[in-house]
Amino acid sequence: MKTKLALAVCVLFGIYGIGCGEEEEKTTEDTKVAEDVTGGEEVAAETTTPAEVTEGETIEGETTTPEETVTPTKVTFKGTLIGFGTDLPVADASIELFDNETGNGTGVSVVSGANGEVEFPDMDSTKLLAFKTTKANHKDTYQFNYEPDATDETLWIVSNTVYQMALGLAGLVVDAGKGTVAGAIYYVNADGEEEPVGCATVTSDPAGDVRYMACEGGLPTTLDKQASTCPAHGRFLATNLPAGKSKVIAKVGETEIGSIEIFTYGDAIGISNIYVKGDANPTPADCK
């Protein structure tokens, strides 16, 4: 996910010379006192005053630069709504646009098409997008940090059946009013491709219960069967998080490799990936 920000700041330093006479004394003040050569009388002190600098004016070879601004344009977001755990398009679901910064709904919504098509025109090109997907017999599903001009994104929705099955496989019980976050840990290589990060562990703040998806089948399982992310997909699940903003942190060994901040909602699920930066995928060489 990328954020666009352009800011240039130019700092000027003025260098001012002090005039020289036949005899000259320099002090630490900005004031010069010149002694009359014939009479020894003091001449009134002179004080140098820095000249005012205006934008674009050159002093000692330096130039101010106006601040650059990014002008928003209108773009169209396009994606497909997919059932989490089934990988099939979901039609006739409601997708509401959310504020990515506040986690609040905007009241703007569309309905997914026959093949799960989703389109939001007239989006601000400078603001990331968030969505809430809802449908009967499904959990409210939230997603954040989408580029507004994406043309082939995937949005997710989780059915009640998949949700309950996942919790059962992981040996988890979610307390009433608590939320869940699911996602994967990816390293983005030089070609822009997402590589799963294996053998990573996840913690959350506030603390919750964490599980990892099994290498076989890709669904959550107990910690004794999968104690870290599978190198084939890098997926995790964090649950029993209080409603509000949560931070989910990924580590390899004791080294933090990435994190996300995501809004969590009671009795709902949020989906967001953790993207890792660096020169190479941090998956350990002996990870299986």
Image (cartoon, rainbow, N blue to C red):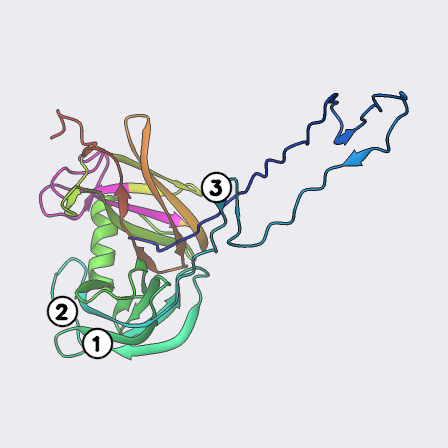
Vertically, is 210 above or below 263?
above
Viewer-side residue, 11 vs 282: 11
Mark 1 sits on what residue? 112
Q: Where is residue 144 in the image (x, y as percent from the top left)?
A: 33, 58
Q: Confirm or deny contact between disc 1 and disc 2 (CB under 8 A).
A: yes
Left or right of 250 on screen, residue 43: right
Describe the element under mark 1 as helix, strand or loop.
loop
Can you tell which quarter of the image residue 31 is in?
Answer: top right
- What's drawn in magenta, residue-wise? 211-240
- Judged by depth in the image, the label closer to the viewer, 3 or 2, is 3
Expressed as whole percent of the image width and height from the top left, the position of residue 269 reads 32, 58
In the drawing, what numbered circle is on residue 89?
A: 2
Give the Cα distance between marks 3 and 2: 62 Å
Q: Is residue 217 magenta?
A: yes
- Give the structural element (helix, strand or loop) at label 3: loop
Residue at (38%, 43%) from the top-left corner? 208
Give the spatial CA distance, label 1 vs label 2: 9 Å
Q: Specify whether residue 228 is painted magenta.
A: yes
Q: Residue furthest toward the front?
A: 38
